[in-house]
Image: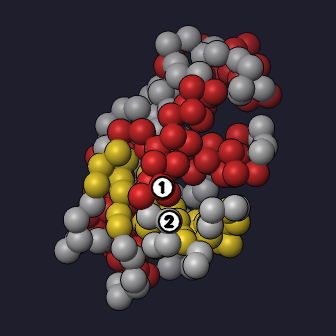
């Protein structure tokens, strides 16, 4: 029997709307993000889901509470977004003004370039993959929802596809990605779906 992981990216925050790097910072949903979460709730009403996991950041917790209001959710620190270090909270324009060289290098080769005071991408990948392996091992034949972050989903998909293209698989806010898995393999059956929006 196949198991399913339903990966849900949290709704928009004020920083997302302002195009700021939002990683470890604990931000709430914006009014638009709350609206997106309510649409996700309608999408998942009555759908059979065995267990729900969530990042311990406010934006993910709020999204999960709205979608699965009557269900118990388990917080997992390993599902937090990456720490962007000196880029955290800056807009793309501010970064280009303050840190153009390191930013350019990091965009071109994120696994090789370390941002000062940031979590290295390889360490982030290890943390996220370990969190997902733990979840999967506990639910080998169940449907599990995970409410988390764009970078978390992207790095996990990179792991599954054995890819180094971190930027390619970042899903949009409030999107749904579905992975089916068994003991031998995992397969992405839906990516970045926004049909509920």
Secondary structure under tag 2 reads: loop
Residue 110 horizontal/vertical position (percent): 71, 27
Q: CA distance from mark 2 to mark 1?
A: 6 Å
Position of 165 with respect to 41 (left or right) is right
Q: Is residue 173 visible?
A: yes
Q: Which residue, given by chain and number where applicable, does mark 1 sit on?
A: 137
Residue 140 bears which disc, if any? 2
- Residue drawn at (57%, 33%) of the image: 126
Which quarter shows the N terminus?
bottom right
Residue 115 horizontal/vertical position (percent): 60, 16
Residue 96 horizontal/vertical position (percent): 66, 22
Q: Residue furthest bottom?
A: 46
Quarter occupied by residue 166:
top right
Q: Please state which of residues 142 and 68 is positioned toward the viewer in this rendering.
A: 142
Q: Please state which of residues 20 and 153 is positioned toward the viewer in this rendering.
A: 153
- Residue drawn at (74%, 20%) of the image: 112
Q: Please state which of residues 81 and 172 is positioned toward the viewer in this rendering.
A: 81
Q: Are marks 2 and 1 in contact (CB under 8 Å)?
A: yes
Secondary structure under tag 1 reads: helix
Residue 49 horizontal/vertical position (percent): 39, 76
Q: Is residue 149 visible?
A: no
Residue 77 bears which disc, if any? none
């Amino acid at each position: 029997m196949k198991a399913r992981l339903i990966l849900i990216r949290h709704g928009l925050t004020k920083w997302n709307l302002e195009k700021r790097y939002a990683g470890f910072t604990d931000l709430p949903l914006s009014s638009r993000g709350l609206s997106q979460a309510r649409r996700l709730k309608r999408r998942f009403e009555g759908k059979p889901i065995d267990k729900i996991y969530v990042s311990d950041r406010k934006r993910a917790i709020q999204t999960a509470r709205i979608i699965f209001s009557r269900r118990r959710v388990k917080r997992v620190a390993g599902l937090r977004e990456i720490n962007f270090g000196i880029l955290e909270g800056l807009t793309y324009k501010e970064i280009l003004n303050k840190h153009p060289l390191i930013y350019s290098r990091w965009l071109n080769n994120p696994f090789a370039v370390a941002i000062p005071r940031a979590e290295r991408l390889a360490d982030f990948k290890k943390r996220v993959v370990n969190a997902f392996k733990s979840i999967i091992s506990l639910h080998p034949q169940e449907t599990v929802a995970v409410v988390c972050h764009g970078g978390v989903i992207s790095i996990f998909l990179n792991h599954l596809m054995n890819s180094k293209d971190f930027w390619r698989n970042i899903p949009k806010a409030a999107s749904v990605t579905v992975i089916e898995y068994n003991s031998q393999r995992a397969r992405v059956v839906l990516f970045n779906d926004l049909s509920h929006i």
